[in-house]
Image: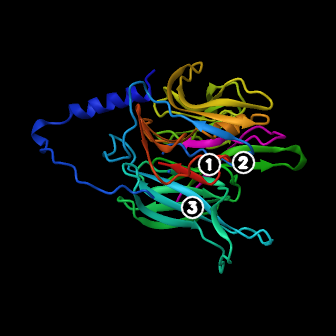
């Protein structure tokens, strides 16, 4: 089984073998530039909720002997996404004496994956018509219900926000073209939709409920621009059991998803039907809250682990992003690590959000993550990037999403 670093080394060697000496230009001194201070394969792991009393101390674990690169002055590595998109949700908090409902706005920003510089931005959900903040109100991040995914050519980004799906079309150079709203009345509001590599299909989670008898969670695929749709429903359940973290495989013929305790692959070329009949489980973690993604080559799973002896009142947990083997969960690589202190009973899914895998590039070689800092991980190199909120006591992921 090869790790991210091995696959990256193989790809670089293949590129180097195709280069002819006579085509190389003389090297020039790099030009000085001012760094800007100021979302692809997997849909981002969106997180909601807050927990009181989490105290965090953080460290970033890298491959032995490596050092983090300075913020992104180098060009993207081979097959690296050119852009990433950050999604933020905002509100104005009224004064304590005000009783009106908080309004909200959702914005999407497209940035260079090499430098983090802003290329363009769009308002996905505007403030309510006629809204004006009154004196004493503050603009603050608020809970984001949704996420973002991208087509392979980075020309279409599927944005999910508060139960609605939007398609953001951009030019080859990243300039905003159009923002279209899709009607997906049965979509589950909290889970991001996934766009196919060719940008022609959209997959999203939906439910079909039967009163007091329970609900069935499933996956629906719609053809963009008009065309048939098809769906797969899971077994009837009396609790909230829906597929999560949808993502198309590189060839667009399968959809991976998380359900119960593992990773599954759905045959998306079929006509629709029973979810588990047309799917196969490729990894069983043995834990009910598992969240992870299979790399495009199928050789590894990227996930977050919470480790340590967690007591009932207070303690300190190790949270890390790892690459594991689908066969038995053998550890292949540790990408990043953080240590989180907590008070009260530990909530493992919430602790896992403190060191989160956000998005995997289409080749599986490049990862967006947020642990001690937000940035990209290439092989054994971490490069910090701007545009994503830092960790806080309530978790950094309730007001943002990111993907490429």
SS state under label 2: loop
**Which element type, helix, strand or loop, lies under badge 1?**
loop
Residue at the spot 46% in from the left edge and 47% down from the top edge: 197
Horizontal side, residue 156 vs residue 206: left or right: left
Q: At x 61% / y 50%, what residue is drawn?
A: 192
Q: Nearer the viewer, residue 32 or 249?
A: 32
Q: CA distance from mark 3 to mark 1?
A: 21 Å
Q: Dot 3: within a 10 Å radius of its alpha carbon, few (fewer than 14), some, or many (20 or more) residues?
A: many
Q: Is residue 56 above or below residue 38?
A: above
Residue furthest to the right in view is: 212
Left or right: where does residue 71 sit relative to residue 95? left
Lateral position of residue 273 relative to residue 301, left or right: right
- Quarter of image, res 320: top right
Quote the CA–CA distance across marks 3 and 2. Answer: 27 Å
Say few, some or many: other residues with alpha carbon within 10 Å of mark 1 (under 14 / 14 to 19 / 20 or more): many
Provide residue 284's location: percent of width, then percent of height. Answer: 65, 25
Q: Position of residue 135 (x, y in %)?
A: 67, 77
Measured in 3D between alpha carbons, the distance from the residue under mark 2 to the one under mark 1, in whole angstroms, is 10 Å
Disc on res. 166: 3
**Residue under numbered circle 2:** 50
Q: Which residues are magenta?
A: 224-247
Query: Reading the chain from its start, which is encountered first: label 2 or label 1?
Result: 2
Disc 3, SS:
strand
Q: Nearer the viewer, residue 310 or 47?
A: 310
Q: Nearer the viewer, mark 3 or mark 2?
A: 2
Q: Earlier in the sequence, mark 3 or mark 2?
A: 2
Foreground: disc 3 or disc 1: 1
- State whether the magenta stretch is mostly helix, strand or loop: loop
Q: Nearer the viewer, residue 98 or 16?
A: 98
**Mark 1, residue position:** 397
């Amino acid at each position: 089984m090869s790790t991210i670093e091995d696959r990256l080394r193989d790809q670089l060697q293949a590129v180097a073998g195709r280069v002819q000496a006579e085509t190389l230009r003389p090297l020039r001194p790099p030009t000085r530039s001012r760094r800007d201070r100021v979302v692809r394969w997997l849909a981002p792991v969106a997180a909601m909720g807050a927990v009181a009393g989490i105290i965090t101390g953080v460290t970033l674990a890298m491959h032995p002997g490596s050092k983090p690169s300075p913020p992104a002055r180098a060009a993207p590595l081979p097959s690296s996404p050119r852009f990433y998109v950050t999604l933020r949700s905002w509100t104005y908090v009224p004064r304590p004496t005000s009783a009106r409902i908080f309004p909200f706005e959702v914005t999407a920003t497209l940035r260079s994956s090499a430098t983090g510089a802003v290329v363009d931005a769009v308002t996905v959900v505007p403030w309510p018509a006629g809204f004006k903040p009154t004196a004493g109100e503050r603009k603050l991040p608020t809970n984001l219900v949704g996420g973002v995914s991208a087509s392979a050519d980075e020309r279409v980004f599927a944005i999910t926000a508060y139960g609605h799906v939007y398609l953001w079309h951009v030019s080859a150079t990243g300039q905003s073209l159009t923002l279209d709203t899709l009607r997906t009345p049965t979509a589950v509001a909290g889970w991001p939709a996934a766009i196919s590599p060719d940008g022609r299909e959209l997959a999203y989670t939906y439910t079909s409920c039967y009163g007091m008898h329970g609900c069935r969670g499933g996956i629906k695929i719609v053809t963009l621009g008009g065309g048939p749709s098809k769906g797969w429903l899971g077994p009837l359940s009396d609790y909230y059991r829906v597929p999560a973290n949808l993502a198309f495989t590189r060839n667009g013929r399968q959809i991976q998803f998380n359900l119960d305790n593992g990773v599954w692959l759905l045959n998306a070329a079929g006509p629709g039907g029973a979810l588990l009949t047309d799917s196969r489980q490729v990894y069983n973690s043995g834990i009910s809250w598992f969240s992870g993604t299979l790399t495009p080559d199928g050789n590894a799973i990227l996930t977050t682990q919470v480790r340590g002896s967690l007591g009932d009142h207070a303690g300190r947990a190790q949270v890390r992003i790892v690459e594991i083997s689908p066969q038995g969960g053998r550890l292949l690589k540790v990408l990043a690590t953080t240590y989180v202190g907590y008070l009260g009973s530990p909530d493992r899914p919430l602790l896992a959000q403190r060191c989160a895998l956000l998005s995997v590039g289409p080749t599986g070689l490049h990862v967006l993550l947020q642990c001690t800092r937000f940035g990209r991980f290439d092989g054994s190199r971490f490069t910090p990037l701007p545009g994503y909120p830092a960790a806080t006591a309530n978790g950094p992921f309730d007001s943002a999403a990111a993907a490429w």
